[in-house]
Image: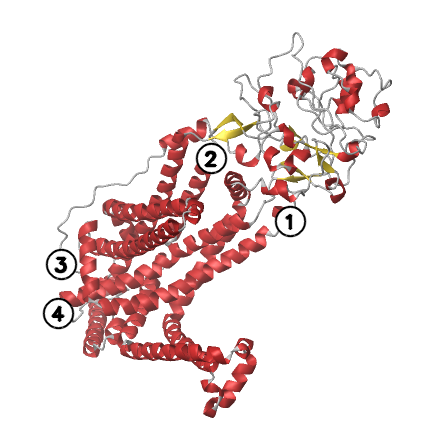
Amino acid sequence: MGCFGRKKKSTTSPSTDESCINQNLLTKIKSDTGKPERLEYAIDSYGNLCGVNNNWDGTGGPDLTSKTKLYYLNPLELLNPATVTTAKAICVEECPGVVGRKRCNFTHTACRCPYYRTAEHGLYATLTLGDTDNQGDYFDAYWSTLTTTTLTTAQCGIDLPGYPDKFKSAFMADPNNPTCGEYLQFTSQYPGKGPCYPVLVATVDHLNRCFPDFEPALLSQVVTSSGLAVYKSNSSLFSSSFSTAGDRLQRYIADIHKGILIILVSGLAAGMFLSLIWMVLLRFCAGIMAWASVLTVNILCAACTMLTFLKSGILGTGSFGALGSRTVSQLSALQSTDASDRKAWLIIAYIMAAATLLLILFTLLMMRRIKIAVACIKVASQAVSTMPSLFFFPILPFLMTVCLIVYWVVVAGYLYSAGTIVAKTTAGSAATALTISGLYDTPPSGASPPPPSPPPPPPPAGAAPLSDASCANNPSCYYDTDWDKQLQYLFIYHFFGLLWTNQFIVGFGYVVIAGAVAHFYWSRGEKSKMPRFPVALALKRAILFHLGSVAIGSFVVAIIQFIRFVLAYLEKKSKMAQAKAGVAGAFVKYLMCCVNCFMWYLEKVMKFINKNAYIMVAVHGSGYCTSAFHAAKLILNNILRIAAVNTVGDALLWVGKISVTAGCGIIAFLMSDLAYYTDSTKYPATCLSSPLLPILVSLLVGYTVAQCFFNVYEMAIDTIMLSFCEDCESHNGTPQYAPLLLLGAIGKQVLVKERKKSKKEEEAQVIRNKEVNRNKELYSLKASSASVPNVVRS
């Protein structure tokens, strides 16, 4: 593609290289093994996922679709970090013992039990259950039917001397000779003894998990099962046990899924609307905003200098006495200045004064270049207003970004949930089991501890094999999701795909905008000389010829960003080791900081090179490397001009991006505070564990959207400036294609007058030509009218 408005032809062929991230393997993994329900629901102690129809054993598994809550049978296990992971839990429809309702005690005995299929003490197939609401082997409310068991007294392992006499008569017709069922109903009132468990406390539904709401009165009775020693702890222990990195990541991803509406409204929609408003302001107030920014920076520096002199006491006397006194009285911070600090403040004041003076001198010296920068911004505004469709072009990369984010979040959810549910073991010990002292007689010093739970007898004849109960009945076993190496590598690949594709979308937008604005510049800012649809033409050329160049530039930036993430991960993982290593750890920390700083700087430089290379790609149609070299040469030859333009232009656009991002954050905060996201009783499916991540994602999305839209002005300004530099170098310092506004800013008044005169002459010539053509038409009409015979006329 040749240069717009010039006779020079491109010496390179259209780019044929492409960038494609193959997602077929990811799609296969997510469709075959991924279960996003694992992000919302928990796994019980038997390897079942609550809220879904399980198929873990290959024969259909239990249908727990209606049982979405995970209930911990013995809430005392959550008070000890050593037993939190292995706490026995089942899936239930509603959290038992909700605040305000009756709970299981010795007068209201609606205890909950493990699934009947995995019943303790060998009870499976020995009870007459009656109506189980079609739950079959996964019925969990069979406490009242324990008296129907066919187990003998010997199989129950009755140990009456180990328990106090109180409460025995409430369950046993003959406390000295109870039946097996009576004994099991009695022991079920003691936490951890089984086969059923009392609902000791109210539970709160949080993230589809029934967490106990411990009361101080109950906590004061918590003791260890070894000698009834007082357990000195509180309910905050169990909450800290649910704060591991894996649990937090699961909650965060679940919050993103639940708060997707917050992200779409406050991040995407609000970001788009606020960005359009700021672009309209730039269109009509570019010059005022630019000069206001320059003056504001100088005024603020001068004000800071004055305040430091006030701190030092220099302005407290003399001609500035009244001003200093008033300022000191209004600024409480200045009242605490000690005499010992005044010398330090005086040094700072002199440094600030020198810096302010240099800034003012620099502003005065750069006034001409600042005028060029302001003119570039105004010309960019003219270019955007000449091509109104350019205002709406960011919608295309915006929609591409939306599709990318939605796709990435969905696939990430599938990948995270695509692990295998496996049994794992921990170092937890039954010696740390807890109980309630009120269930026992207060023992004298040295009394025997409560009896241990008897070993479960072998299952009776005809019982089904209970392989899924082997882990649940093991105090050191629990089920968890395991990620294999393939899934870990796939997630890394998926994450790199996010970085690369995001940069590709940004680069694609750069090339299209640069191509459209270049049409405007090389047509001398005259709409009549531009193509009819410049944006559509630039889009077509970008798709047909420049995707390979965009892919190369975006790939380089994505690699640098990926390395930065890897370094950040390694630094976080090695923090504890660095702290323990002493001097060596401090050196490693310093080295990591230097490497991170270098990579950050390298990313910024590479993005700057990419942006200018994309402009040259759009202007000349050359390859990426050639364009990058040519752009670097232009920048070095016009460093002061470009520095002024970038400083002023980037400042305005940065303020715009921050304003849009802040607006998106405020809207996200207000939305997350609605009852729809905070009331777990009315809206359990959308209640957030924390609004932090949806708000942060909304801020990130809002900033990304603002970046897509502000790329229009940013690229327009940079394209005008780089085209201007190219124009100057190609014509011995006198630009021939610059718009009139830009020519006036650099003092080329003669050229401006000549251009205006030439334009007037062209317009006058056009008017004369129209007049001549109209006269010819009138003459031909008169001639034809005169040649008609009078007879015909009459």
Side (left or right) of 107 relative to 337: right
Quarter-of-image position of residue 686? top right
| Amino acid on which the number 2 mark rests in the picture | Tyr
Residue 7, which numbered label? 3
Q: Between disc 3 and disc 1, whose residue precedes?
A: 3
- Could you tell me how far apart the alpha carbons at marks 4 and 3 are, in whole angstroms? 17 Å
- Could you tell me how far apart the alpha carbons at marks 2 and 1 are, in whole angstroms? 29 Å
Note whether 266 is above or below 372 in the view shown.
above
Q: Between disc 2 and disc 4, whose residue precedes?
A: 2
Q: Which residue is mark 4?
A: 732
Q: How dense is the environment of label 3, judged by Cα within 10 Å: few (below 14), some, or many (20 and up)?
A: few
Note whether 619 is above or below 725 in the view shown.
above
Q: Please state which of the two labelled residues, at mark 2 or mark 3, is closer to the viewer.
A: 2
Q: Nearer the viewer, residue 546 or 426?
A: 426
- Could you tell me how far apart the alpha carbons at marks 4 and 1 are, in whole angstroms? 68 Å
Is residue 679 visible in this depiction of the protein? yes
Q: Between disc 2 and disc 3, whose residue precedes?
A: 3
Name the residue located 38 percent from the left edge and 38 percent from the top edge. 492
Side (left or right) of 488 relative to 457: left
| Amino acid on which the number 1 mark rests in the picture | Ala
Tell me whether circle 3 and circle 1 mark residues in contact (CB < 8 Å).
no
Q: Which residue is mark 1?
A: 675
Q: Judging from the image, what secondary structure is the residue with disc 4 in?
A: loop
Q: Please state which of the two labelled residues, at mark 2 or mark 1, is closer to the viewer.
A: 2
Q: Please state which of the two labelled residues, at mark 4 or mark 3, is closer to the viewer.
A: 4
Q: Judging from the image, what secondary structure is the residue with disc 2 in?
A: helix
Residue 738, image x, y percentages = 22, 68
Is residue 4 visible in this depiction of the protein? no
